[in-house]
């Protein structure tokens, strides 16, 4: 049930439209609700107004029936949680936000069964039974606490089936510890499996070192091969963290594909310890060029009827088709919570131990603190975002990384979105079945 | 005002389309053709000229083939070769079968005619047969009879059963085997193989000469015979502007009121004129001819605040439907069925038949409200809504009136008109339900409620007709008595009626609880229990024959106990 929530007015001076181009001509993006239109080829006027009456633009920007107005904060029942099952990791990646799962001392012990069980019960009891419900596993490396994952999956699936709920699972893992029984577990359930692998042998071993002196590339290759060959019900994707040390995404993409991954997503490193390899202002234009280069070759595949394997691109296209538009970049504190090993509920898995993000516990959410969080994180509350045309597509980006936002990193987001918008229009015109297939999937 | 030419923006994503479709918040009045033009309310038959030509379904009776059907001939017009390829790659069709399809396809594409020479299959009551299509002819009678023509033969084939065709082109013959196709999917929707327009492709249209061959004005029913006239400018305040005129009148003069439709033999456009001047016929929106851009009327229905409130109102809506059935049945059975003077008999018989039809129609609404409630409940246990409303919405917004079964005198019929009138009373209740479902429900739920609202419109219209028919006569002549009252509690006929009614509710409760398909036998049993001398109809008739009003007692069982407005 959606409860009445506070409204956060937008900036009346903020742009409500954006003109962009594609191989087909010029197009109009109505910023609220992400409506996309083709502009007539002969339309007079400059790019600022494109000859469009302000009254028309304003009318198009209004919320339509069934659309949640963008000034609204939303407090839905949590629909997905992640369980931080482990407090340690067998790798020691240079950029780990979780300090290998210990969160700098905030999570010293792995999660006990009682905490996982109570959290799952709370999720299933309160979630909307008509929509899918997701239980995720994070850490540290989640499979360090293998018995808990197996037990929690069996319990959640059993309870879900008793109550007629559509319970799904997700796990983010470095993939190196997967055993046969783990792979059977993943194959047997609707698991979204994200395997963190940064690139080919050199990049992976450098960015994700295994402390035992072994090479993490060899470990992940060997352990994930059977799953990639036969994923069963699981949907497997690779996630590659990109540091400024190596911005050659084409090479990374091909190296990971060659391992048999069907889908790959890139995540640029924005926050790192001093002296770390986070992207700097001068890196963002290079990063944009690099990801667009990968996306262009994937777009060509899509025009020929093949799938798009770059998840950043595939997800963007799908969302533009739907007209995805949100004042929040993710479900943190809304439909999604992350449960720490001690049973505290945080808005985000990256914020374990951070007091402003602690919004409740297994005993229940703190409604006032949650509301305060959602009001504060609404894109209309972000001075740097209120005037941006991409505000409902980017929505301010990851809360944890917001403090690292710069003009240059925002320039990357806008450049990437502009590329995706143009690519969307071309694909929607020439290969509309790409989207109808996605929509029905 | 800007002198700028209109700008044509082409929607490029779902959100852009959504904005175009929903200009106003809340529930909108949708202008256009009246409810009688909906497919399900049309005079559906198998011949062209009405809503759809059902014969077009049979054009796709065999997998991957589209055929033309004459009296004693079936010929292939196209092959879905992409579908054949998919079927081969899915391992569902052997390659030798695919090569036959390929061969037929290349023949058809190059203008060679492939005919169905023989067809083997299960032909319904005629059993398993191998028919030579060219031999089919009338008469079709006797023990070993054959279907009279190719179309009937195909129509008799049992859905999903094996069919074998011998296709012939010159001296070449090929055999194809497949199952008789399903025309509807599991949700009752037309199968995807049918293209938009395919079922109406053979209908008469006023701008073609087709209907001439039918030998009559065989309008598709979305073409009215009569309509309210164009409003002259300025519109005079005279009753004639609200009287119907012939839509296809010959006199097309603007700004004068045409002659009314009631005159004998109005001067109408001839066949030739309709062919050549169809574009002079005016659009008809909301029953009135119009030549100006349509300005959409709107009303905003208030939404319920929560799912719980929506559910309570749906439960109440089901109760209102049951309550009005009580009133409609009391009115229907209060009309005389025998001893009517010849001059009024037809009017009274028609009024009673329409009252009964509407009462039965309300049973569908009870089901519709329960269907939506069940869907909203999702996986939670479902408790059917079969509690009769204590009070029903009144014509004054927000007010309620008690349920009062009474004879069909003029004030009663007027109260029925008020009850069903658009935008108020019951329609207002459903408008709020619909508005809320736009947020909390699915398209299917919305369609269900829209269909109930559209029926309400049709009921309103019908009660207006009943008022007109009965209004010509003295109530003393057509009513069994104007002072009918319910029988005393112990009356045996009354008790029998209560038992029949209780059994009906029990069957419905059990059917709705189980849902479809498991509950279908119980729902069918309820339907059957409504009709016939031994059913609810017979029991009610007996009460009326004994000189009493047909009325239903409140039931104390918590499943059926009366419910009040939430």
Image: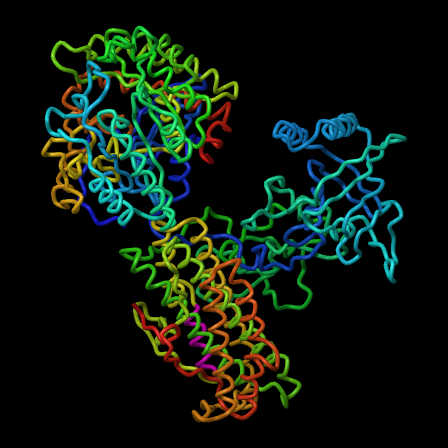
Asked where in the image residue A100 lies, by quadrant, the reply is top left
Q: Nearer the viewer, residue B268 or B127?
A: B127
User: Is B418 included in the stretch rendered in magenta?
Assistant: yes
Side (left or right) of B20 relative to A202: right
Q: From this viewpoint, is residue B242 visible?
A: no
Residue A438, quarter of picture: top left
Q: Does the magenta stretch include residue A73?
A: no
When asked about the image quadrant of residue B45, the answer is bottom right
Q: What colouring style does the render use?
A: rainbow
Majority secondary structure of magenta residues: helix
Q: Where is residue A145 in the image (x, y as percent from the top left)?
A: 25, 30
From what the image shows, is residue B339 above or below residue A132?
Answer: below
Residue at 29% across, 28% down: A393
Residue A168 appearing in the image: yes
Q: In this view, does B408 lie above or below A53?
A: below
Stretch in magenta: B409-420
């Amino acid at each position: 049930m959606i409860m009445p929530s506070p409204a956060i007015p937008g900036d009346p001076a903020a742009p409500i439209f954006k003109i962009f181009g594609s191989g087909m001509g010029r197009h109009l993006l109505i910023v609220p609700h992400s409506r996309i239109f083709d502009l007539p080829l002969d339309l007079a006027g400059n790019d600022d107004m494109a000859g469009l009456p302000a009254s028309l633009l304003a009318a198009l920007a209004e919320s339509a029936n069934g659309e949640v107005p963008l000034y609204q904060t939303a407090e839905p029942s949590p629909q997905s949680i992640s369980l931080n099952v482990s407090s340690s990791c067998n790798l020691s990646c240079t950029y780990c936000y979780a300090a290998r799962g210990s969160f700098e001392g905030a999570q010293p012990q792995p999660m006990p069964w009682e905490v996982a069980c109570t959290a799952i019960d709370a999720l299933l009891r309160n979630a909307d039974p008509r929509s899918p419900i997701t239980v995720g596993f994070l850490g540290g490396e989640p499979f360090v606490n293998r018995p808990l994952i197996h037990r929690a999956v069996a319990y959640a699936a059993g309870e879900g089936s008793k109550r007629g709920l559509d319970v799904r699972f997700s796990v983010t893992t470095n993939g190196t510890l997967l055993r046969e029984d783990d792979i059977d577990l993943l194959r047997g359930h609707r698991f979204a499996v994200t395997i963190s692998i940064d690139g080919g042998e050199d990049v992976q071993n450098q960015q994700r070192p295994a402390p035992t002196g072994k090479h993490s590339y060899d470990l992940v290759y060997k352990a994930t091969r059977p799953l990639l060959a036969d994923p069963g019900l699981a949907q497997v994707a690779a996630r590659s963290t990109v540091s400024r040390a190596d911005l050659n995404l084409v090479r990374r993409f091909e190296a990971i594909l060659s391992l048999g991954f069907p889908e790959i997503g890139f995540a640029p490193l924005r926050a790192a310890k001093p002296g770390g390899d986070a992207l700097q202002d001068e890196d963002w234009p290079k990063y944009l060029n690099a990801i667009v280069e990968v996306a262009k070759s994937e777009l060509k595949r899509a025009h020929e009827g093949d799938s798009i394997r770059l998840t950043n691109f595939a997800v963007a296209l799908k969302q533009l088709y739907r007209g995805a538009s949100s004042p929040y970049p993710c479900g943190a504190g809304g439909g999604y919570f992350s449960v720490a090993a001690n049973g505290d509920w945080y808005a985000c898995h990256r914020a374990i131990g951070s007091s402003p993000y602690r919004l409740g516990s297994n005993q229940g959410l703190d409604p006032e603190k949650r509301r305060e969080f959602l009001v504060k994180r609404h894109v209309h509350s972000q001075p740097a975002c209120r005037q941006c045309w991409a505000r409902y597509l980017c929505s301010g980006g990851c809360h944890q990384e917001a403090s690292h936002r710069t003009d240059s990193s925002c320039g990357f987001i806008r450049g990437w979105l502009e590329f995706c918008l143009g690519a969307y229009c071309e694909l929607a015109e020439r290969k509309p079945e790409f989207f109808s297939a996605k929509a029905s999937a | 005002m800007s002198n700028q030419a209109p700008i044509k923006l082409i929607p490029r994503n779902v959100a852009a389309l959504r904005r175009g479709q929903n200009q106003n918040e809340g529930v909108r009045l949708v202008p256009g053709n009246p409810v009688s033009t909906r497919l399900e309310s049309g005079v559906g038959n198998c011949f062209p000229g009405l809503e759809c030509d059902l014969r077009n379904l049979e054009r796709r009776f065999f997998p991957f083939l589209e055929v033309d059907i004459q009296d004693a001939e079936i010929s292939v017009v196209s092959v879905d070769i992409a579908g054949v390829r998919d079927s081969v790659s899915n391992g569902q069709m052997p390659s030798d079968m695919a090569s036959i399809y390929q061969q037929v396809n290349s023949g058809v594409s190059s203008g060679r005619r492939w005919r169905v020479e023989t067809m083997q299959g299960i032909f319904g009551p005629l059993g398993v047969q191998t028919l030579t299509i060219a031999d089919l002819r009338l008469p079709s009678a006797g023990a070993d009879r054959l279907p009279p023509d190719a179309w009937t033969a195909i129509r008799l084939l049992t859905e999903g059963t094996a069919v074998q065709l011998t296709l012939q082109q010159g001296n070449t013959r090929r055999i194809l085997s497949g199952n008789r196709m399903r025309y509807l999917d599991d949700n009752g929707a037309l199968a995807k193989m049918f293209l938009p327009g395919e079922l109406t492709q053979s209908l008469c249209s006023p701008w073609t000469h087709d209907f001439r061959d039918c030998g009559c004005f065989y309008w598709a029913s979305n073409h009215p015979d009569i309509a309210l006239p164009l409003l002259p400018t300025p519109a005079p305040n005279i009753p004639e502007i609200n009287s119907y005129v012939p839509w296809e009148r010959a006199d097309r003069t603007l700004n004068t009121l045409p002659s009314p439709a009631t005159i004998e033999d109005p001067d109408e456009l001839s066949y030739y004129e309709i062919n050549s001047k169809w574009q002079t016929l005016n659009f008809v929106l909301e029953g009135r001819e119009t030549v100006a851009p349509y300005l959409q009327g709107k009303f905003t229905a208030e939404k319920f605040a929560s799912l719980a409130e929506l559910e309570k109102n749906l439960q109440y809506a089901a109760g209102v439907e049951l309550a009005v059935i009580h009133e409609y049945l009391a009115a229907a059975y209060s009309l005389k069925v025998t001893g009517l003077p010849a001059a009024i008999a037809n009017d009274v018989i028609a009024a009673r038949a329409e009252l009964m039809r509407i009462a039965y129609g309300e049973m569908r609404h009870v089901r519709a409200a329960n269907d939506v409630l069940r869907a909203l409940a999702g996986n939670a246990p479902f408790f059917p809504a079969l509690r009769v409303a204590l009070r029903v919405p009144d014509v004054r917004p927000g007010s309620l009136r008690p349920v009062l079964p009474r004879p069909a005198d003029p004030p009663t019929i007027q109260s029925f008109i008020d009850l069903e009138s658009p935008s108020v009373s019951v329609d207002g209740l459903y408008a709020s339900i619909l508005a809320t479902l736009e947020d909390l429900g699915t398209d299917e739920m919305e369609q269900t409620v829209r269909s109930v609202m559209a029926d309400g419109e049709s009921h309103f219209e019908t009660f207006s007709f009943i008022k007109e028919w009965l209004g010509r006569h003295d109530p003393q002549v057509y009513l069994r008595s104007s002072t009918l009252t319910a029988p005393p509690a112990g009356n045996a006929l009354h008790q029998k009626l209560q038992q029949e009614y209780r059994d009906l509710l029990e069957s419905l409760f059990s059917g709705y609880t189980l849902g479809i398909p498991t509950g279908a036998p119980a729902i069918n049993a309820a339907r059957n229990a409504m009709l016939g001398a031994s059913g609810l109809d017979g029991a009610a008739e007996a009460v009326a024959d004994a000189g009493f009003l047909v009325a239903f007692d409140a039931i104390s069982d918590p499943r059926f106990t009366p419910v009040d407005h939430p």
